[in-house]
Structure formats: C-alpha cells, structure tokens
Amino acid sequence: MWSEWPIVATLVRLAIAAPAAWVIAWAWSRLLAFLWSSGLDPRHRLAHTVAPFRLLLALIVAGVALDPLEPTETPSSVAILVVSLALFGVVAFAELRDIASGLGLSLRRPFTIGDHVGTDDVSGQVIDLGLTRVRLRTPDGGVVDVPNRELASTRVRMSAGTRRALPISVDVAVPAGRDLAEVTGALSDQVYLSAYVDAAAPVIVELLDQSRARVRATPVHADDTDELRSDINARAALIGARKLKR
C-alpha cells in the first residue's frame, strides 16, 4: 500500500523515528548526568560523545524516513535532487558549520564540562556540549548558548579547572562621607557582577583605612587580569559618583 504513496510513507516514518530518536538522545543525556552525579567519569570525557551520538541519530532518522523514496535515474529526478540539496545547503549553511565544528570539538576536546571558556563577546563555565551549541553559565548566573563555530576558532580563551587563574588585589578609593559597611557591601556586589570575575571564587573587600579599600577577586581566565583590575576600579569610581549625585 505504501509503495503507491512514498511521500506519505516517508512522513509516517519520520513521525515515528524522530520522537524515538529524541527520547534516546534525552535518555543518553540523563544517563550521563547520573554518572557524573555518582562520581563516575570525573573528567566528563563522555560529554564529548553527545554531539556524535546526536548526529548518528539524525542520520538514522533521515535514512529510515527516506527509505521509501526510490528516485529514478532520469535527468529530471537527478536535477531535482541536486537542486534540493543545494537549497538545503544554502538554508542550513550555518547549522552545518556548527555541526562540523561540534564534531571537531568532540575529536580535539580542547575543553570539557566545568571548564571556563570565553570569546570576544561572552565567557562562562561550560555546562553542556551539544551538536550545534555549547551552553555556558556566565559569571552573573545567566545561561547562554554559543554556536560551536565560535568556540572552534582560535579566538577562544580557556581556563580549565587545573589551571585556574590566580586571585588579584586592587586598592580602590572609598568615597568620603559614606557608611563603611555600605561601601564594602556595594563593592562586593559590584565586583560579583563583573563579567571578568570568577563567581565561584570568593570576593573579599578589606578596609585599609577611612579612604582606601582592598578588593581581592579571581579572574575567570588568567589573561583577564588587566580587564578585571580595570573593571573593579571603574565600579569603585561608579559607587563614588553615585554619592556625588545625591
């Protein structure tokens, strides 16, 4: 019966195979989460199996769905196939680049879950490695999805857990006429909001005297030291400027 309606057979197969593949991919992710929470695979090496596994499932779904189609070798059918593939390549060019980059990251393994990575636009801790995206938790607690092609470039900075950046100390001016407890609390809150500070490390604000305070914080990356130092000074100056506006 289905041989007379290959398109219908393809849609039926796709409706069955796609949800089944999604369930299998979800179950694999849950299994990895269980292994990591149980202390197995402490270096999260199995995280790099997610992208190839999802691609394999996608190819299986495509093969199952397209199996009823038996295009003839006539010039018209070949032309239609070539045009369709060309259009698909143009429309999905970015996604295909992300998939290829994801496979490259899985093979090279420059970082894994728990490492801190960053580009010119965003930085954070890796919490998920996907087929087309890498999910990061930013220093302010937010979650962003970064295309794999961006993290596969040479512009990426990486600071693994075994090579964490060293804490720095910055002396800043304390605005006159302000409650010292209020100033130290405001400084601590502002430093935690910096995109360059490691939110998992403590931020310590110590009063040196009535006009100076010392801030100790840890950059996300070792090469973010100068940026964090400048940001702390700028945020301290902002606290003083707010006092002048009152």
Image (cartoon, rainbow, N blue to C red):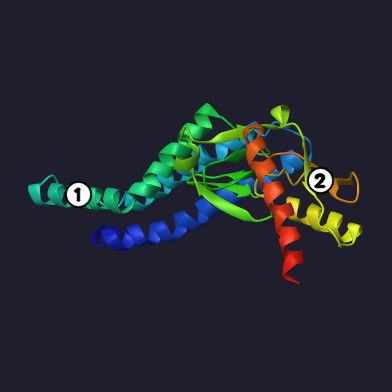
Looking at the image, which is closer to me, 92 or 76? 92
Residue at 61% in and 47% down: 136
The three-letter amino acid code for the residue at tag 1 is: Leu
Residue 216, position as x, y percentages in the image = 81, 41
- Judged from the image, the secondary structure of the residue bearing numbered disc 1 is helix
Q: Nearer the viewer, mark 1 or mark 2?
A: 2
Q: CA distance from mark 1 to mark 2?
A: 60 Å
Query: Which residue is under mark 1?
Result: 81
Query: Which residue is under mark 2?
Result: 203
Residue at 90% in and 44% down: 208
Residue at 42% in and 49% down: 61
Tell me which corner region of the image, top left, top right, bottom left or bottom right, holds residue 39: top right
Count residues near mark 2 (Cα–Cα under 10 Å), then give few for <14, some for 14-19, many for 20+.
some
Q: Quadrant of the C terminus?
A: bottom right
The three-letter amino acid code for the residue at tag 2 is: Val
Looking at the image, which is closer to me, 201 or 151? 201
Residue at 46% in and 35% down: 153
Residue 230, position as x, y percentages in the image = 66, 44
- How many marks the image carries: the answer is 2
Looking at the image, which is closer to me, 150 or 183? 183
Q: Quadrant of the N terminus?
A: bottom left
Query: Mark 1 near mark 2, Cβ–Cβ under 8 Å?
Result: no
Q: Quick one: which residue is furthest to the bottom in this view?
A: 246
Q: Earlier in the sequence, mark 1 or mark 2?
A: 1
Left or right of 154, for residue 122? right
